[in-house]
Image (cartoon, rainbow, N blue to C red):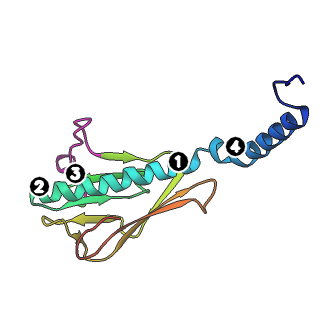
Amino acid sequence: MIKADGFTLVELVVVIALTGIMMAVAAPRFTSGDIFETRGDAGLLSSTLRYAQKTAIAQRKKVFVLHNDAVEPNTVSLCFDPNCGAAQVVINPETAGAYVLTFSHSVIVGSSNKALGFDGLGRADPNELATYRVTNKKNELQFVGISVEANTGYIH
């Protein structure tokens, strides 16, 4: 008896059908990069908050995280003064300019405190819970929340 090598037509059709079903389910998740931008911007915001806290501890003076959409939309700035004069900006070590985080156009950032500060011990000022919410513009169910604890300044 001769042994035939290869696949039967039925096996090939089943594999192609299963591959097509898996692609139909998985492809929309990978083609829409919106959730990746939302999570990426939330990560950048969290890093910016930590940088502000560490700068406040290192400099032993208050650092403010200013989120004011009326002045400059979709940005967060770091300053040593709540009014953020030109001489009071925190320097970004990457660019040697003012530390300004600009978010992508596909997200909306909301905050419970537009001028959150960190004192010389890294505690939140004012001493209350501050929350940030990075939301996808196309799908508001896709969001990432960031909290800054009141007494400790712990960011999560």
**Is tag 1's residue or tag 4's residue first in the polypeptide sequence?**
4
Magenta-drawn segment: 83-99
Q: Position of residue 66 (x, y in %)?
A: 32, 58
Residue 73 seen in render: no
Which disc, if any, is residue 71? none
Q: Is residue 94 magenta?
A: yes
Q: Position of residue 38 (x, y in %)?
A: 51, 52
**Is tag 1's residue or tag 3's residue first in the polypeptide sequence?**
1
Q: Main secondary structure of the magenta part?
A: loop
Q: Secondary structure at mark 3?
A: loop
**Is tag 2's residue or tag 1's residue first in the polypeptide sequence?**
1
State the residue position of label 2.
58
State the residue position of label 1.
36
Examine the image and state in which quarter residue 124 appears: bottom left
What's the residue type where badge 3 is placed? Gly
Q: Residue at x 61, y 63 (%)?
A: 141
**Callout 1–callout 4 Cβ contact below 8 Å:** no
Q: CA distance from mark 1 to mark 3?
A: 34 Å
**Is tag 2's residue or tag 4's residue first in the polypeptide sequence?**
4
Which disc, if any, is residue 85? 3
What's the residue type where badge 1 is placed? Phe
